[in-house]
Amino acid sequence: MPRLPAGNLEWSVQAVRDSGAGLIVDVGGSTAPELADIAAAAGVDLLTLAGRLASTPEMVRRLGRALGRTERGQMLAEEVERWLDLTRRATMSPTRIHYGCGPDALEVPVADTLARETFTHLGLEMLPADSDGPLARVTAADVTAFDPEWIVCLDEAAAGSIRADPAWRPVRAVAAGRVLASPAQPFLWLDRPPGINRMLGLLWLASRLRPGGTDDGELERCLRILTGRL
């Protein structure tokens, strides 16, 4: 299925027709009005899903029904409900975390965004940030003052840079060796897209924050289920 670029309705309609798709799935709903026009012009159905973490079980059920895989959708929804319950407030005590986006790990999700939900579900305290967009720019001084117990970066390059930079050493997470790079295959595990892939992120992060809280066996089971190997 091709990506549908914003702002080019004619090209997008043709792309949908050329793909032979019979359904457009929009997760998050931010582009739903534009996609509704595209779907109508291309003569295909549109399924808009909320994308909120708590609504993931129902999102999976709806997608299963739309794809004619109702039983598979119900099975996945039940697993998601179990994973959400298993990881809810997994830290058991207030824990500060810096989720560093961008190449220098100095962009953070703002409050009440989909990208922040994984962390709030686990009971984590994040660096306050405000912006008109989904990400806010912060400084290394902001992070040092916040003094997180954990740092999670989008990739190993950013995590490695933080570990090697003397300017970051006063931060508690760096001093304790608690700087992680989030897995990102085939999609980001922690936030994007806001779908069932976030179950992997919940289980992965919960197991690192509180060893014994959730084990890697559960994470492996999640991987096997989501890839259709179980």
Image: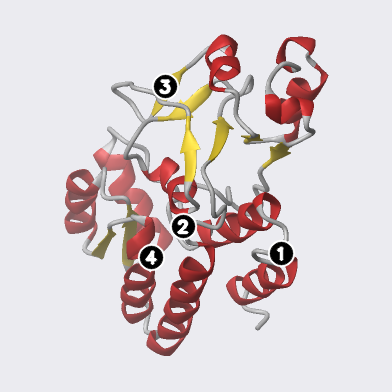
Q: Position of residue 104 (x, y in %)?
A: 63, 19
Callouts 4 and 3 close, C-beta under 8 Å: no
Residue under label 2: 1
Q: Quadrant of the C terminus?
A: bottom right
| First in residue order: circle 2 vs circle 4 | 2
Dot 2 or dot 3, earlier in sequence: 2
CA gap between label 4 and label 3 equals 26 Å
Specify the amino acid type for callout 3: Ala
Question: Quadrant location of residue 81?
Answer: bottom left
Cα–Cα span, label 4 and label 1: 25 Å
Residue 136 is labelled as 3
Residue 48, image quadrant: bottom left
The answer for how far apart the CA atoms under marks 2 and 1 are is 40 Å
Residue at screen point 26% across, 50% down:
29
Of labels 2 and 1, earlier in sequence is 2
Q: Secondary structure beneath disc 1?
A: loop
In the rendered image, the residue lying farthest to the right is 164
Asked if labels 1 and 2 touch by Cβ distance under 8 angstroms, the answer is no
- Mark toward the viewer: 2 or 3: 3
Label placed on residue 212: 1
